[in-house]
Image (cartoon, rainbow, N blue to C red):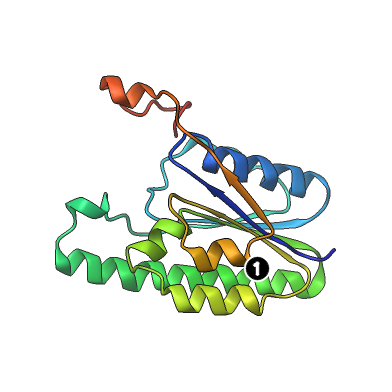
Amino acid sequence: MKGLIHIYCGDGKGKTSAAIGQAVRSAGAGLSVVVVRFLKDEDSGELRSLSHIPGIFLIPCKDCFGFYWDMDEEQKKEAAKVYGALFEEAWEAAEKQAQARDTVLVMDEIIAACRHGFVEKEKLLEKLQEKPERMEVLMTGRDPEEELLNLADYVSEIKKVKHPFDKGICARKGIEY
């Protein structure tokens, strides 16, 4: 398989759901799948489900820092260390898997992690340009930078038309997470 690059972006609900759906499809077809999440905690229905699917490897984030706009400068520095190391760990795991078989790397919210400076954009771009042939890469997040869009083979924009959050309804377990 010649691995391609996917971006699921936009302000609508469903970016993570699309990436997780692709991860499940890929695992069902016998591909190796590595999933890593940025800017989110580990309390999520999809993670509990994915952990039971053979061929899917989850790279957990041990620290959660909350929303970017709530972090002080010290927390932002610490988040950059944690998320930068998490990116490296996930990339290395997927790269190792791709030596033996076709592999899908799902990086949920990597686009926001880059935009806020938690993962170095140049490092991500370099890795994407040099990725193994057998590695498919899926990235999610709002407002991808032009350089990422130019590297991508698939770009799917998920547009919000209406969302319950606009009426004050918070994220619901099993639906939004």
In the displayed structure, 109 sits above or below 150; it is above
Q: How many marks?
A: 1
In the displayed structure, 59 sits above or below 47; it is below
**Which three-letter amino acid code belongs to the residue tagged 1?**
Ala
Q: Position of residue 162 (x, y in %)?
A: 41, 23
Residue lying at 43% horizontally and 49% vertically, measured from the top left: 142
Residue lying at 75% horizontally and 70% vertically, measured from the top left: 98
Looking at the rendering, which quadrant does residue 49 occupy?
Answer: top right
Q: Position of residue 95 (x, y in %)?
A: 67, 74
Q: Nearer the viewer, residue 8 or 81?
A: 8
**Residue bearing mark 1:** 94
Residue lying at 65% horizontally and 68% vertically, measured from the top left: 94
Q: Quadrant of the N terminus?
A: bottom right
Q: Position of residue 88 (x, y in %)?
A: 50, 74
In the displayed structure, 84 sits above or below 111; it is below
- Is 99 on the left-hand or right-hand side of 42? right
Q: Position of residue 36 (x, y in %)?
A: 52, 57
Residue lying at 40% horizontally and 70% vertically, measured from the top left: 119
Q: Nearer the viewer, residue 172 or 147?
A: 147
Q: Residues within 10 Å of mark 1 (few under 14, many from 20)?
A: many
In the displayed structure, 61 sits above or below 134; it is above
Q: Nearer the viewer, residue 109 or 63?
A: 109
